[in-house]
Image (cartoon, coloured by chain):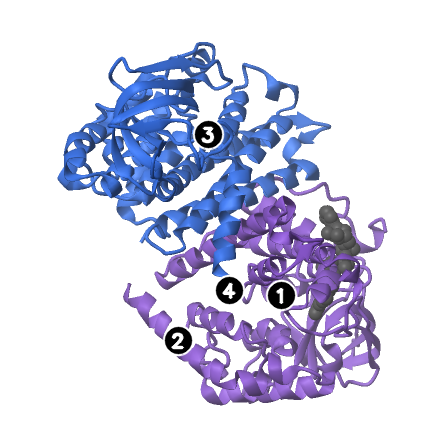
Chain colours: A blue, B purple
């Protein structure tokens, strides 16, 4: 019953917060901003040692056999500390894709390795501006991939990817092993470099079919990833909002705390409202992962979370005055991450369309 | 889990019962009725509920209620809301005035009032707001003067915005008994008989054509001291107590306006010069944003009800509901008129819940009644986020010396 967290779920949340808080280092994160191709290995080591990549992997495959709610709880904690690597959620998406669509051999080969954090999974569905391209330029033929996916999150260091690729029977979802020399990665300079966005050129990359109806399968996985990401966005929004609230209480102007000025108070109250709506949407979607209407709950969670994180980080910088926009104040970590998470797995234009199509079908 | 099934069963049984009466007492039966006829139907509906055991669901049995919990009440109200029954007249009455008199008075008389109110035979109103005090409730000026010999009181002044006063038998009222005291200390609380000599009720016509709110004038109205609730000078405290007495309300993510799927249906069926409206990105954005917002509110509601069922205290985030749903409803209703083109101006006033024009034209009052947007933001900021109060020039100053 994850609409309200049970005892063990609350424990997971507290444990994650505690561990990540101790590991959090703004200077280290800012250093990552200034170089391309590096991620926070310390953070990823923590994830692995805590068993977080195993959360949603079935127990039979070496996982913890938990679900999207637990994945979300951890993602939310990671969001609070602007975590320095994308693989927890992308790996979750890859595990889900293999678990749902892979054959026994694929499950045996990859799930234990993903669960153990030995293999980092990434998601390469989008092309150009389309999160789910109807006619992908990347092709899958005779067990090999050719063509290029641009700006793949985690592309700089992923070991295994789910890819939406064209076949003679239309787009298919395939699983690509990135360990060989057939895959060339071109790291992109970005405003949030630890996300490791890279163009990935496939020149005969070995791959196997997961689902022939690629769009439908990819959409299913994208919805799961959207809900996990929504939790991460909510975590980020909560953290940046907490900074703004604290600053508004301690900073004085005109003889009183900033927080006593109504425009500041109301801004914070509006932020709180957006965050609560986003948090509740995300929890609700995770709780209803097996519901026939899951796709619309996922889209709603994604839309609300993007709005909440963008707004909370924008407004926090306003509350901080001139300080807000400085390298020193750390708020730009959230400013960047809010936008990165907003566009990485389909922007709100995409998710709005997804949602409207779902609702249209119902009426 | 067990508790959840029990409540689901309660809801299911209630729904079946409500369905059985929808045709005779719900929205279809109300079409074309005069206000008097509608009120009569409402009274009949309340009596029917009383006899069926659906009145005062979470009130104690000794007060004529069912002795059940907030969950059952919410479940029933949520189902009842779907059929458009004429319950509006009784919502204030049973929500605040009657529960507060049951708390402060004992004996047969008050029990008889409770029974009559539950059955819809009598209605109570809430006479708090005045021309000088709405948001600023303690800014009210209506004078209560005590006769030193008898101890009884005389009321002089005006109340404003009193919902359904024209149909009411009784009311609860806060008055100023001493303007030389500090603002919040000079208030005293009474119940009043709306037929007492010197009381005049004048309906106010609102923008949507309805006239359920009133101004109420008190001209030397005699109120026995036995009608005082709480001590002399304790009026503000009793008023606050009144406002929080009914903590769990059924809420509507659509802000008590038309449901979002009506919007989707209307957009899906229409085109502009051959271009389907539902293909327009601006229309799509509105739909998606409103869905996300309403779904968030539904999620909060579902979670809070689950917590209630487990005997836990629901989180404070329920407070965002009225704020966001009322203004979202206003904007969406406004937008429906755009969708309809120049013909968007056509309207035959109706009291119907699914009427977008009515929803739009009455939305501004929805953003004031029961707490304005700004006051709700203050509440969230101060109570939930622990931020400081506004600068308050009225603090620590005798009422009659506060700038006005
Ligand atoms: C349809 C309807 C039914 C009602 N029914 C009842 C009833 O049955 N009984 C009853 O007692 N009252 C009732 N009311 C009154 C209602 O509670 C008040 O209208 C409401 O509290 C606002 O008060 P006001 O109208 O005096 O506006 P004001 O208090 O004068 O406010 C005007 C504007 O200023 C803003 N404002 C005020 N103070 C602040 C502040 N501190 N900070 C920022 N902004 C501020 C408000 O948000 C508002 O937008 C009803 C009102 C309506 C519209």
Asked if A83 appears above or below A297 in the picture, the reply is above
Disc 4 within 8 angstroms of ligand 1 (CB): no
Q: Do callouts 3 and 2 mark residues in contact (Cβ within 8 Å)?
A: no
SS under mark 4: loop
- Where residue A338 appears, as percent x and y from the top left, is 51, 29
- Where residue B276 appears, as percent x and y from the top left, is 63, 53
Q: Which residue sits at x=58%, y=85%?
A: B25
Q: Do callouts 4 and 3 mark residues in contact (Cβ within 8 Å)?
A: no
Asked if A172 appears above or below B372 in the picture, the reply is above
Q: How far, Cα to Cα, is label 3 from label 2?
A: 44 Å
Q: How far, Cα to Cα, is label 1 from label 2?
A: 37 Å
**Relative horizontal placement of residue A44, taking residue B221 as reference (left or right):** left
Q: Which residue sits at x=44%, y=11%?
A: A31
Q: In front of the other: label 1 or label 2?
A: 2
Q: Do callouts 1 and 2 mark residues in contact (Cβ within 8 Å)?
A: no
- Where residue B238 appears, as percent x and y from the top left, is 62, 65
Label ID, residue B238:
1
Disc 3 within 8 angstroms of ligand 1 (CB): no
Asked if B250 appears above or below A359 in the picture, the reply is below
- Where residue B19 appears, as percent x and y from the top left, is 48, 81
Q: Which residue is mark 2?
A: B12
Q: Which residue is mark 3?
A: A344
Task: Give a yes or no on whether discs 1 and 2 share a subunit.
Answer: yes
Label ID, residue B248:
4
State ligand 1's quadrant. Answer: bottom right
């Amino acid at each position: 019953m994850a609409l309200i967290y049970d005892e063990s779920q609350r424990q997971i949340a507290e444990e994650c917060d505690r561990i990540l808080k101790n590991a959090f280092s703004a200077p280290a994160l800012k250093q990552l901003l200034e170089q391309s191709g590096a991620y926070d290995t310390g953070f990823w080591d923590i994830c692995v040692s805590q068993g977080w990549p195993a959360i949603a992997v079935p127990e039979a495959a070496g996982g913890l056999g938990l679900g999207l709610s637990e994945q979300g709880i951890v993602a939310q904690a990671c969001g609070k500390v602007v975590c320095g690597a994308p693989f927890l959620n992308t790996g979750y998406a890859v595990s889900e894709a293999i678990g749902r669509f892979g054959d026994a051999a694929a499950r045996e080969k990859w799930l234990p390795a993903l669960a153990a954090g030995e293999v980092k999974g990434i998601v390469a569905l989008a092309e150009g501006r389309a999160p789910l391209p109807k006619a992908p330029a990347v092709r899958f033929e005779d067990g090999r991939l050719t063509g290029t996916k641009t700006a793949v999150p985690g592309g700089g260091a992923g070991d295994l990817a789910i890819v939406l690729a064209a076949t003679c029977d239309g787009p298919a979802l395939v699983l690509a092993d990135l360990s060989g020399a057939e895959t060339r990665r071109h790291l992109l300079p970005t405003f949030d470099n630890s996300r490791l966005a890279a163009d990935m050129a496939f020149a005969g990359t070995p791959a196997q079919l997961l689902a022939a109806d690629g769009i439908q399968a990819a959409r299913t996985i994208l919805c799961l990833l959207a809900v996990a990401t929504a939790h991460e966005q909510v975590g980020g929004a909560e953290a940046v909002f907490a900074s703004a609230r604290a600053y508004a209480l301690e900073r004085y102007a005109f003889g009183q705390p900033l927080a006593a000025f109504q425009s500041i108070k109301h801004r914070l109250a509006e932020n709180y409202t957006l965050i609560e709506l986003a948090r509740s949407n995300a929890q609700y979607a995770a709780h209803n992962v097996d519901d026939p209407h899951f796709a619309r709950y996922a889209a709603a969670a994604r839309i609300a979370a993007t709005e909440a994180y963008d707004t909370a980080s924008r407004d926090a910088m306003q509350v901080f005055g001139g300080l807000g926009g400085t390298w020193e104040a750390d708020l730009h970590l959230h400013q960047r991450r809010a936008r990165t998470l907003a566009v990485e797995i389909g922007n709100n234009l995409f998710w709005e369309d997804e949602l409207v199509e779902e609702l249209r079908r119902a009426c | 889990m067990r508790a959840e099934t029990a409540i689901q069963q309660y809801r299911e049984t209630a729904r079946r019962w409500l369905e059985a009466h929808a045709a005779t007492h719900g929205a279809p039966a109300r079409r074309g009725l005069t206000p008097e006829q509608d009120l009569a139907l409402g009274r009949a509906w309340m009596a029917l509920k009383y006899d069926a055991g659906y009145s005062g669901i979470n009130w104690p049995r000794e007060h004529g209620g069912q002795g059940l919990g907030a969950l059952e009440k919410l479940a029933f109200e949520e189902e009842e809301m779907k059929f458009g029954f004429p319950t509006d007249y009784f919502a204030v009455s049973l929500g605040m005035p009657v529960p507060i008199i049951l708390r402060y008075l004992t004996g047969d008389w008050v029990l008889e009032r409770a029974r009559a109110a539950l059955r819809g035979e009598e209605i109570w109103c809430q006479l708090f707001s005045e021309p000088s005090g709405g948001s600023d409730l303690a800014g009210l000026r209506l004078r209560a003067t005590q006769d030193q010999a008898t101890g009884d009181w005389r009321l002089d002044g005006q109340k404003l915005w009193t919902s359904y006063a024209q149909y009411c038998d009784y009311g609860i009222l806060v008055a100023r008994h001493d303007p030389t005291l500090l603002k919040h200390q000079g208030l005293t609380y009474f119940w009043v008989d709306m037929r007492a000599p010197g009381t005049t009720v004048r309906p106010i016509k609102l923008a949507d054509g309805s006239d359920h709110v009133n101004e109420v004038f008190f001209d030397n109205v005699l109120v026995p001291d036995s009608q005082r609730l709480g001590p002399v000078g304790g009026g503000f405290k009793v008023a606050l107590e009144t406002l929080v007495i009914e903590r769990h309300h059924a809420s509507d993510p659509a802000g008590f306006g038309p449901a979002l799927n009506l919007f989707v249906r209307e957009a899906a069926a229409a085109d502009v010069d051959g271009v389907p409206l539902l293909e327009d990105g601006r229309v799509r954005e509105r739909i998606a944003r409103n869905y996300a917002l309403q779904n968030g509110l539904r999620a909060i509601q579902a979670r809070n009800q689950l917590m209630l069922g487990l005997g836990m205290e629901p989180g404070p985030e329920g407070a965002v509901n009225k704020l966001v749903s009322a203004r979202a409803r206003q904007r969406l209703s406004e937008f429906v008129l755009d969708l309809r083109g120049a013909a968007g101006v056509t309207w035959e006033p109706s009291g119907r819940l699914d009427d977008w024009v009515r929803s739009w034209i009455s939305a501004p009052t929805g953003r004031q009644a029961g707490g304005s947007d700004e006051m709700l933001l203050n509440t969230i900021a101060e109570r939930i986020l622990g931020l400081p109060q506004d600068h308050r020039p009225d603090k620590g100053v005798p009422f009659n010396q506060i700038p006005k």
